[in-house]
Image (cartoon, rainbow, N blue to C red):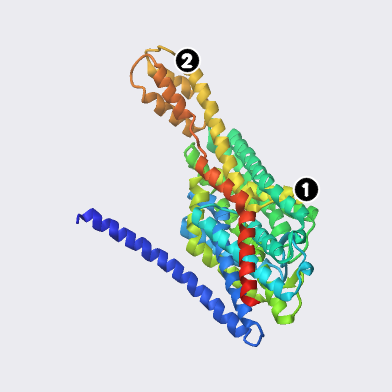
Amino acid sequence: MKIRDYVKIENATDLSRTEVGRIGTAVIFIVAVMIYSGNQFAHVEQSFLLIAASVIGAYMAMNIGANDVANNVGPAVGSFAMTMTMAIGIAAIFEAGGAIIAGGEVVNTVKKGIINPADLSNKDVFVWAMMGALMGAAIWLNAATWLGAPVSTTHSIVGGVMGAGIAAAGWEVVNWGSMSKIAASWVISPIMGGIVAALTLYMLKRLVFFQPNPVAAARRIVPIMISIMAWAFTTYLALKGIKKLIKIDFSTALMAGAAVAVLCYLIVKPMVARATKDLAPDRNSVNSLFTVPLIFAAALLSFAHGANDVANAVGPLAGVVEVLSSGTGSAKVSIPMWVMVIGAIGISVGLALFGPKLIRTVGSEITELDRSRAFCIALAAAVTVIIASQLGMPISSTHVALGAVFGVGFLREFLDQRMGRVVETVLAKHQGDPDIDHVEEVLMEFKNAPLDDKRLMLSALKEMGPEAAITAAQQKKLKKALKRQLVKRSSLLKIASAWVITVPVSACLAAFFFYTLRGMMI
């Protein structure tokens, strides 16, 4: 056996050990939840159901951490503003903090009013339905994570509740008006996120990167952009992140955001001026100015996500605890602190163990991100949620973030192809020019071209060699080089397909688990 064969075997063994270690750690967390809930409810008549529900809730929380949190930190990691370890640490802390501090004392057991608990025949049916909903949603999230497809955890649990409700009480139990709004968000959320991100990036390019001296332009524009981000995140957190701690109306949230933005501008402007004093006038220098804002954005998005989405994991679990411990069930229930802690820890554990795969997908596998593009994506996520909340439009934060990533990528394609058409025109005018360097000089006069696109065009020209004439074949090669697909189409198809089937697949799985539980219990 050759040495390289031994190396392959060793690498495969290391990968296997790593995978077993992750699964083993997840099992330890699940067993700890099982032991705790067993001791907590040993006196309850159907304690085995409570233990099972707690385990399923913990499993659901881990899958939320593995799949959904990637949207908050993926762009920052993909742009190298943070390392993977740093991103996981920050996200885990702020996700758990958001869940425990601002997760709220009361949650909806049935998300978005999909079904009415009163329509279920008795408390046993309600318990089976909630457990089936959790299990169906968790299994689908696990599969989506394995496939590398970021999906909405809210839509997953909505599908689970719908499927379990239909299995328990028939089609008429579902509030189809609410379901139609959720279906509309499949289209509205990514389109809004993509448009806002693309517009933000285009403004940044025109005002900074397309200028003769990008660093001098950044000295003026970047403090304003960071202040806008401060406004957006303050308003976003006031409306979404702490809404279960204190109710703040939209106008008050806007004023608080404006006050923070002004303060941020006064602090950031001299800092940017000092930071740009010795920077080279290029794109990389400007990108370095967005590192700290991206770290803050990842932390704040994670906090808001933990505060809002912990209910996806613990809402149905809290309903089961309420029914089995007190004998009553309702659409809204109080959450015991231990249930909230299970959700918070579960999200953090899932993120740390299985989150890197989806973080890489969001950060680098859809389109290439630098720090300015990642900044635009984070800003778009907050601004879009604010706009949609005020307009009363249904929206998914996951779809918004992914739509923003795709929006940035498609804007790059548009600008790239537009520059390609300009280059073709210039080359046609210089057909037969004996001095290829002259063509290069003409191309360098396009002040509005991004620097990385200029380098691409010059590289393609140099590949043509010293021949005076530019042949048709060479022009075709140049056209192909300049009209690149900067958004990976396979990722677009995979993610869009996963979004479309999330609700029906979760519903079918939940119905299956409901019938299984009912068959076991009757």
Q: Residue at x 38, y 18 (%)?
A: 436
Farthest-out residue, left = 1
> Which three-letter amino acid code belongs to the residue tagged 1?
Leu
Please give the name of the residue rendered at 43% of the width and 18% of the height, measured from the top-left corner: 439
Q: Which label is found at residue 391?
A: 1
Q: Nearer the viewer, residue 519 or 240?
A: 519
Mark closer to the chain start, 1 or 2: 1
Q: Is residue 357 above or below residue 108?
A: above
Q: Quadrant of the C terminus?
A: bottom right
330 relative to 465 in the view: left or right: right
Given residues 350 and 434, the one toward you in this image is: 350
Residue 49: image location, x then y, percent: 63, 78
Give the residue at mark 2. 428
Q: What is the C-alpha distance between the residues marked 1 and 2?
A: 50 Å
Q: Note whether residue 63 is visible.
A: yes
Q: Can residue 448 be seen in the rendering of this structure?
A: no
**The N terminus lies in which quarter of the figure?**
bottom left
Q: Secondary structure at mark 2?
A: helix
Element type at mark 1: helix
